[in-house]
Structures are given as C-alpha cells and as structure tokens.
Amino acid sequence: MRKKIVAGNWKMNTLLKDGMELAKAVEKLEKDKQSDALLIIAPPYTHLSRVNDLIDNVKLAAQNCASEESGAYTGEIAPDMLVSAGVEYVIIGHSERRSYYHEDNELLNKKTKLAISKGLKPIFCCGEVLEEREQGRLFDVIREQLTVGLAGLNMEDIKQVVIAYEPVWAIGTGVVATPDQAQEMHKFIRDLLIELFDKEVADNMTILYGGSCKPSNASELFANPDVDGGLIGGASLKAEDFLGIANAY
Ligand code: PGA
C-alpha cells in the first residue's frame, strides 16, 4: 500500500505570526482527520524552525533547497540546514522554480541527489505547459523531466522520493485537470518508473496531483487509482480547506 499524502505549498505567503497560526490550526484539525493521508506543510524558509515546534503529526517541508552542500552561495539554503531546522521533505522542481528561476532538469537532478544524501525526502515536481499539451508533447516533456531529474538514483534513493504531477496550466489558474487527464498522466508516470527503476518502485511511488485542487474537486481526482494525493497551493492557506481536501478521500 503506498502512502497517501496531502501537502500544502504555502509559496511566498504569510508573515511569521500568521504562518505559525496556520500551522497550529492545521495540526489541531489533523487530529480529527477522516482519512489516513499524511499531511505535510511547506512554509517559507523563515518560518520553518518556529513551525517545527508547533507540529507533530503534520510533517514539515521546505519549498526549495540549494544544489551545493555549503560555502560561498549567498542567499542559498543547504539541505543540511533544513534538516537541522526539523525539515523532513523538500519540494524540488516546482514549475515556478523552473520558469522564474530557470532551474533546469540537470540542476534539479543535482538538488535531488544532494537532498537525499542529507536525509531529506524530495517531492519532485513535473508538469507540462499548455502549449506542450496542445501540441501533443506532454508525455515527452514529463518523460524528459523525470528521466533527467531522477537520473543516477539507486533503488534506495528512489524510495525517498514523492512525485508531484502539476500541469502548469492548472497551477493557480482555477482550471483543474479533469480526473481522466490526471489519471492518464499518473499512469504514464507509473509505467515510466517501471522502465527507469522497477515494478516495485512504481507500485510503491506516491504520485500527487497539483493544480487548482480544492475541497470541491479533490474527491473525484483522488478517486483515480494512480492519484495518491495532492500538492496544494492556494487552498493550503486556509486550514479548513486544506483539511477538507485531506478528508476528500
Ligand atoms: P494551486 O498551486 O493549488 O494554487 O494551483 C499548486 C502548486 O503550485 O503546488
């Protein structure tokens, strides 16, 4: 049985005080959760160690990490530093990092390997832009992102990874993938994992859907056999909505 996960990506939202309130509210509501999904929250870097003191059942993620171990990289945060702040998961390759900060598949591969070597569990994101979907290139794009992004991981490394499929045209747009579109790509990703690793890895991989997921559309997305939860942006900023999504199972 693979792990079900609902992860909240807060992005660049909340000041410290609001973030701490939100984390507390999520932890409180987690107690009454009506599903066995693991809840993860990814606050901004500045909140991580304070939020870590407020959560227990809810797990902590960072939204990014450096590709280098330490040293003269002004403004970067090393995986080791995240671990020392109580972080367990790290989002790698979110489409906003790929597009605004030009993070390419090779760099994301380096981050993934370094994060795993330091004990973090990457939530590795992939997704096509609308034009790529319209041109029928969506499967090639995802194949490339995952083949390069996960290159060089051994059978133990890959067990630490969670994959998030986030069609870029659905992120923050209110346009959600249809359950069929999500299932089709999640199945493609699972089959690709058989090719890249083996069937056991593929069967055990948690594959999250992300992009305009809300309490009102989560149950039909999560009803798909290959959708194992969600990576939630906007709707993770309200504890009730976030828990509403977790309860959609
Ligand atoms: P959204 O963002 O839920 O606001 O569409 C999802 C994400 O970027 O992870």
Image (cartoon, grey):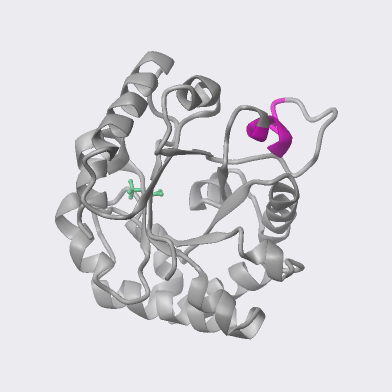
Image: 112 above or below 177: above
Looking at the picture, how far across and down is residue 147, in whole percent?
Answer: 65, 73
- The answer to whether 137 appears left or right of 172 in the picture is right
Which residue is found at the position 64% from the left and 46% from the top? Answer: 120
Confirm whether residue 137 shows in the render: no
Give the position of the C terminus as an image quadrant.
bottom left
Looking at the picture, how far across and down is residue 231, in whole percent?
Answer: 39, 52
Q: Residue reaching furthest right? A: 71
Which residue is found at the position 42% from the left and 69% from the top? Answer: 131
Range shown magenta: 75-83
Which residue is found at the position 21% from the left and 50% from the top? Answer: 34
Frontmost residue, 72 versus 155 = 155
Frontmost residue, 172 versus 246 = 246
Place residue 152 in its image quadrant.
bottom right
Place residue 3 in its image quadrant.
bottom left
Which residue is found at the position 75% from the left and 25% from the top? Answer: 74
- The answer to whether 33 appears left or right of 96 in the picture is left
Looking at the picture, how far across and down is residue 137, in whole percent?
Answer: 49, 79
Answer whether residue 195 is magenta in the image. Answer: no
Frontmost residue, 112 versus 25 = 25
Frontmost residue, 102 versus 38 = 38
Looking at the picture, how far across and down is residue 47, in whole percent?
Answer: 49, 22
- The answer to whether 45 appears left or right of 67 in the picture is left
Image: 126 above or below 98: below
Q: Residue reaching furthest top? A: 17
Image: 33 above or below 240: below
Answer whether residue 80 is magenta in the image. Answer: yes
